[in-house]
Image (cartoon, grey):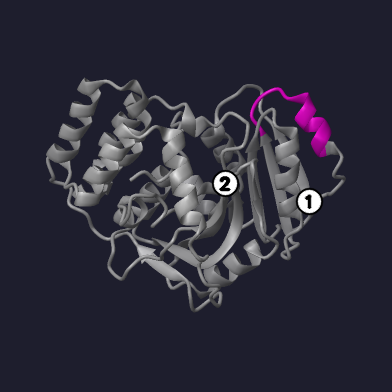
Amino acid sequence: MSSAPEVSVVIPTLARPDLVTRAVRSALAQTVTDIEVIVVVDGPDQATRDALAGFGDPRLRVVQLAQKGGAPNARNVGAREARAPWTALLDDDDEWLPEKLAVQLRHAEAATVPTPIVASRLINKTPRAEFVMPRRLPSDGEPVCEYLTVRRGLFHGDGFIQTSTIMAPTALLRRVPFTVGLRRQQELDWTLRALDHDDVALVIAPEPLVLWHQDEDRPRISLNSPWEAQLEWVRTMRPLLTPKAYAAIVMSIISSMAAPTRDVRVFRMLLGDARRHGRPSAIDYLTFFQIWLIPPQLRHTLRDRVLGRRRPAPALTPDPGATALPLSPVPTTTPGNDVHA
């Protein structure tokens, strides 16, 4: 390709040739055809290279890394390689619906801020149910950190952002790279740090444009992350969080990772940390106790059954329905809900 494409698609992968070829097919099948698809192979992986060689599409480019550096590093490499003004992220185990990029480009064109991050709803597919997330769009004046973390019910997904829904200016992804070494909440971390820039706002397309495949028989990074490291992460993020958001993360995200320890000292420490540095709501307390008392598999089954019975979000018209969200100011002098669990 001689001229720059309209959108660069970045897909990090390693040792999952069947999954990544499914993701690549969904990218190449977009109604927006002026794209490049950059698959960043995160370390030696001949099987994946062989599988991708079968596409024979000049829009597909494979970048091979000499050693494994993790998905955040692979995304950063992809953003540096991107030639388009917009870069859309796609995890190798997810799929896009054909209109995904077309809808997001319309929202980007209609945005009233210089640097919009354009996300969307998605269809969460599990073996037990399918449901649309996020279940609601942000309220006027609602801080983004609270929209993305604070629950209004016992199940996650009221407010939500997931990597495969994100399309952003390539220059922004280079200015604010993903945090290398962070094993969980990578998209939340990146979004909040990006929105800390005055020229950046979040635009959410109300249409579900991504298929998010969950709970399949394969290892997931998000299920193996040490809770201690995530607690350190959220403590470093406190300047970008309201007390309500901080308490929700500790009592939901961090607790869902720590609860399998069944350690009373950890239980008390996390509860005390959330109370000391945050402002827990009644829902936070209910979430905290059910995470510690109900086994994870049973909790997920109950969640999927409840949410799977709900009617999907209504299909809204593309451009007028988008919600633009600059990050509301949050207190930085404060002493001191699970987005995915």
Q: Is residue 26 left or right of residue 302?
A: right
Q: Earlier in the sequence, mark 2 or mark 1?
A: 1
The residue lying toward the viewer, choosing from 111 and 214, is 214
Nearest to the eye among marks 2 and 1: give it. Answer: 2
Q: Is residue 75 left or right of residue 31?
A: left
Residue 289: x and y in percent read 26, 38
- Disc on res. 59: 1
Query: Picture quarter containing residue 99?
Result: bottom right
- Residue 185 appears anywhere in the view: no
Question: How many neighbours does mark 1 have within 10 angstroms: few (below 14), some (14-19), or many (20 or more)?
Answer: some
Mark 2, residue position: 128
* Residue type (three-letter) at the residue carrying disc 1: Arg
The residue lying toward the viewer, choosing from 275 and 163, is 275
Question: How many neighbours does mark 2 have within 10 angstroms: few (below 14), some (14-19), or many (20 or more)?
Answer: few
- Quadrant location of the C terminus in the rendered image: top left
**Span shown in magenta:** 41-52
- Residue 127 appears anywhere in the view: yes
* Residue type (three-letter) at the residue carrying disc 2: Arg
Residue 20: x and y in percent read 71, 39
* Residue drawn at x 67%, y 61% as measured from the top left: 6
Residue 39: x and y in percent read 69, 40
